[in-house]
Image: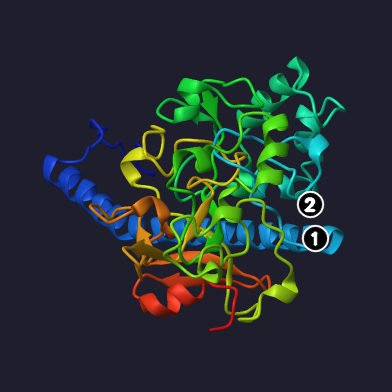
Amino acid sequence: MTRYTPPHSFRVGPPRGFTLVELLVTISIMALLLALLLPAVQSAREAARQIECKNNLKQLAIACHSHHDVHGFFPTGGWGWFWTGDADRGFGKDQPGGWIYNTLPYFEQYSVYETASDGDPEKLTRKQRTGAAAIIETPLSIINCPSRRANVAYPLTSNASGVMGFFNSLTPNRAGRSDYAANSGHVFNEWSNHILGRGPRTYEEARTWSTAGYWGVDLAPFDRTLPEQQVMSGISYERSTVAIRQITAGLTHVYLIGERFIPSEHYETGWHIGDNETWCTGFNNDNYRRTGRLVGREIVESVPIPDTATNIAEDWGRFGSAHSGIWNVAHCDGSVAGMTYDLDWRIHRDAGNRRAN
């Protein structure tokens, strides 16, 4: 007779969990892995942002060359810090807007360019002033460095225009800004004389200024301390019409557009003197940079600096960037390069001068 054997039974107890020590070890390992991976992730993100920044400069350089192909010169620098762009006034010396405004049609932003048009180049109508204000408030991704700040409008608070008002626009509370500047030369990136810097107050007065030679570039050097060829030696500046044939120093050796210094604590405030206007104004230190400084009668260094730099002489005139170790620049041949901050100040100075030494 076969003896019946009941199935083996198991005692089921409560599930075993992590001990405190095991949990702490697991958390420590995860934290270590995260610490090892985070710098790599951040580095990859910054590398991608630098590529995007260089691509922006490349597209802007192409737009400047397209402008040159059509009009025979690189985008003009406009009039002064109280003036914005007016589509009815063409692309030359009569255009009060700066270099970015003049390139709008050449990087597929014609609708923005003509927003302030009222069909009359001599009168300032309500339609034009309202349209110009809308342009001022418009942020553009192509002029935004993603390593620095978001592509949004920022407060228009500390600039003189916020108090007195633009001459050909209503003055909004917020403004789009650019992280790139055109090369205005190796001496000036705006006029130190307030009247010259602001420009004429009306279109009618602008005609008088042109007849009498009141423009800063016509008076320059207004203190007669520098040879005329040293005053506006760049590619875009007040009422400029610089053609390729005038760049005798060589297209590969002269800056066209570069990243500009903005102190990191003022990315969003609008309180820094070199970042308190907007991207579409005429010739002023928001949208133009120089490669030298005039001290007495001598041109001295004005090397690029990173945004973390502090207590630097006349930082509002310098190129620079939010990137670590480099700043990006487009040369007049359209090539884009990442430049280090330790380049010789004389080489940098000469790269702002279109004329052969």
Residue at horizontal 40 percent and vertical 40 percent from the top: 267
Q: Quadrant for residue 58, please give it.
A: bottom right
Q: x and y percent of residue 107 in the render?
A: 76, 50
Q: Amino acid at mark 1?
A: Ser
Judge whether 313 appears above or below 244 on screen: above
Residue 4 visible to the viewer: no
Closer to the camera in the image, 83 or 229: 229
- The numbered disc on residue 66 is 1
Residue at horizontal 66 percent and vertical 50 percent from the top: 99
Find out whether the residues at labels 1 and 2 contact each other: C-beta distance under 8 Å. yes
Q: Dot 2 corresponds to which residue? A: 106
Closer to the camera in the image, 148 or 69: 69
Question: Which quarter shows the N terminus?
Answer: top left
Point out the tag, 1 or 2, that comes first from the N-terminus.
1
Q: Amino acid at mark 2?
A: Tyr
The kind of secondary structure element at disc 2 is helix
